[in-house]
Image (cartoon, coloured by chain):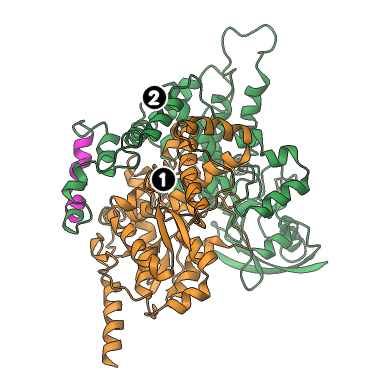
Amino acid sequence: MAEFKLKIRRYDPEAGAAPYWDEHTVDLEPHRSVLEGILQARNENDGSIGVRCSCRSAICGSCGVRVNGKPGLACHTHLDDALASAGEDGVIEVEPMGNMPIIKDLIVDMDAVHWKKIQRVTPWLIGKEPVPEREYIVSRESMIDVTQSMACIQCGACVSDCLSMEVDPLFVGPAALAKTYRFVGDPRDAAHEQRLKDLGEDKHGIYDCTHCFKCIEACPKGVAPMNQIMRLRRIAGNDFHIKDRNNGERHEAAFVKNIEKNGILHEADLLPDSYGGKFHPRAVPELISSLPIVMTALLRRKMTPGKALLHPHKAPDGVKRIFEVVEGRDERNEFNLYISGTDANNEGTAEVAEAIETAEPAGVAPDGTEGSSA
Amino acid sequence: MKVAYWPGCVSRGFTAELHGSMAAVAPMLNIELVELDRASCCGAGVIAEHSQELADTLNARTFALAQQEITQGADLMMNICSTCQGAQSECQQRLDASAEYRAQVNETLSDEGLEYQDGIINKNFLWVLVEDIGLDKLKTLVRNPLTDLRVGPFYGCYIVRPTDRLDINRAQPRDEYLGQVIEALGGTVIDYAGSHKCCGFPIITMNKAASLEQAGRHLGDATDADADCLVTPCPLCHLNLDLQQPMAAKQVGRELNMPVLHLPQLVGLALGLSPKELGLQHHIVKPTSVIDWSQAVVGGVGGW
Ligand code: SF4
Ligand code: SF4
Ligand code: SF4
Ligand code: SF4
Ligand code: FES
């Protein structure tokens, strides 16, 4: 047994008092979970601590909290690991998740935010017609492809830390979009295009993600929601040519074209092209609104008129060739680490994998899975 | 040391002062820069969003070019952009994971006679400073310690997440390096809410209000924490935090006057270069506090 100090964030909106920190010392084996620590504090010291849990084995998704600022499952975080990531005072901080209203202490209102957003994306299979007499027959690979998004246990950890949602509460968010991929990646579903169109036309849909990796870092199940969002964008843009209301597809196309032409990014063209070209009606107000900045930039000689108008670079032939070959393929060649794993993990024993990892400082770990520190 | 140097695109376009200040600081740190001038943009995550294989192949080409320099004596590949670091590490992770996939990508590169061999070491200048030059060595090179300069770190998402891909762990706390460098240069590290958050740049053309709201909040938080300036290893963050700062101020409805320095500029100030030599006059937000500080230091030296 060992003693651990827990600092729990307390708040009761109904009581009207401000939130405060409450410290408890618990006595448990170091490999026991933070959840058990909280429960011991509740059972032995203060029965009023609000915490939600059920399975205690990382599968029901009800015990999402922030431990030392990082979101995760309280039942899936060992006390010794939590201590190691604690501040210098050696006190483990437990707070409710973010981006959702607090009901009491560590319990947040998942209904008001998380579940509403999940419902928003039609989270069930819309079967293809005609419905076969028996089951739908699909290939094994196509089902493996959606296993990563199926691993979600709806804990809300990703929602808690989403940086787009922090500034835009209407953003559909990582969990709901990962759920969307679960159906867009499923060959039995009949509504791929409608789903993507719906989320492309929603200004707070697939193109509202700011690519911050927070959800990948937060997810205790390796779902990597951001990666699923990027796959949704690829399918929406490349396969269905959906013109979204955020100019996301156009921006992406403009960026890719820019690199194909110049080899390196030519920003002065990118902005107008993202809105459909310098003379596109949508580009004009955009350009005028950025005029004061452009003027200041010119004054400070940050941009020179020459730089803004001329292309100092031309893509080397090698770069052009890569675009030709890859863009000319009939089918997307998309290597998925979650499914394929690494050579080292697939072939070698654990020792071999470890030897390779220690030999190379830039070692690899499968995408979205826990690192070697876990 | 000698490095195969990938300056990125923005550092030769809208933030030319970054490339310039890196070139000015490198010899003082005894870094020889061999520029990879035939390489292409890393794609900044956007090309990967369009086609993973395209991004992987373009970056494999850059790595192969860097490896040619490494066989000729360069120690590693170095970049000066958080986004390059993240986007390139992502591609490298896939390329290094599978010999079969690597062979497919190398097949495309073979037209140019290039081949990527797994395991390249590609580090942002920030990592090179701490891991290869070392903070102790850096301290000995400081001529104008940043005494009384209150600096807020701003990392940029791509250089701090995901932690497993970027090899960030307790033994190698790469997500704390900016603070360590500021301290080694004699400055005061300012702790504020936004240091590891997103500047909003990726959605500037897609949801401008949300994008500027992010930038504005972080700049406001840093102001409230009494920072004199921010420092970032990412030119794209710099675009949203400096170039767009007037718009961000409008968005959040408060005055913001927060200078944002590129990492080599901050290092250069401490190593004795003048704000002008480091291109600080090209910033949109006048780095008045920094210039006042540097004049006080120079003036102080003269006066005593
Ligand atoms: S990557 Fe996108 S979805 Fe994920 S947390 Fe960031 S903004 Fe949210
Ligand atoms: S994606 Fe991961 S973090 Fe998000 S709700 Fe599902 S399991 Fe939780
Ligand atoms: S991240 Fe930026 S600077 Fe780096 S290569 Fe890409 S676009 Fe260019
Ligand atoms: S902070 Fe902004 S520019 Fe910087 S890496 Fe993140 S999204 Fe990119
Ligand atoms: S209690 Fe069920 S996941 Fe933690």
On screen, residue B37 versus residue B127, left or right, reads: left
Per the rendering, the colour in which chain A appears is: green
Mark 1 vs mark 2: tell me if same chain.
yes
- Look at the image and say whether residue A285 sits in the magenta stretch: yes
Residue A242's label in the rendered image is: 2
Above or below — where is A328 with respect to A268? above
Circle 2 sits in a helix, a strand or a loop, which is it? Answer: loop
Q: Residue at left 17%, top 47%?
A: A306
> Label 1 is found on which chain of the structure?
A
Q: Main secondary structure of the magenta part?
A: helix
Mark-to-mark CA distance, 1 and 2: 23 Å
Q: Position of residue B270 (x, y in %)?
A: 38, 75
Q: Residue at left 72%, top 45%?
A: A58
User: Does the image show residue B233?
Assistant: no
**Mark 1 crowdedness (10 Å alpha carbons): few <14, some 14-19, many ≥20:** some
Above or below — where is B44 with respect to B129? above
> Label 2 is found on which chain of the structure?
A
User: Does the image show residue A221?
Assistant: yes
Circle 1 sits in a helix, a strand or a loop, which is it? Answer: loop
Magenta residue span: A283-296
Per the rendering, the colour in which chain B appears is: orange
Above or below — where is B68 with respect to A47? above
User: Which amino acid, mark 1?
Assistant: Asp
- Look at the image and say whether residue A317 sits in the magenta stretch: no
Tell me where residue A257 sits by quadrant.
Answer: top left
User: Which amino acid, mark 2?
Assistant: Ile
Q: Position of residue B278 (x, y in %)?
A: 29, 66
Lower sequence index among marks 1 and 2: 1
The quadrant of the rendering that contains the N terminus of chain A is bottom right
Residue B269's label in the rendered image is: none
On screen, residue B93 versus residue A264, left or right, reads: right
Residue A168's label in the rendered image is: 1
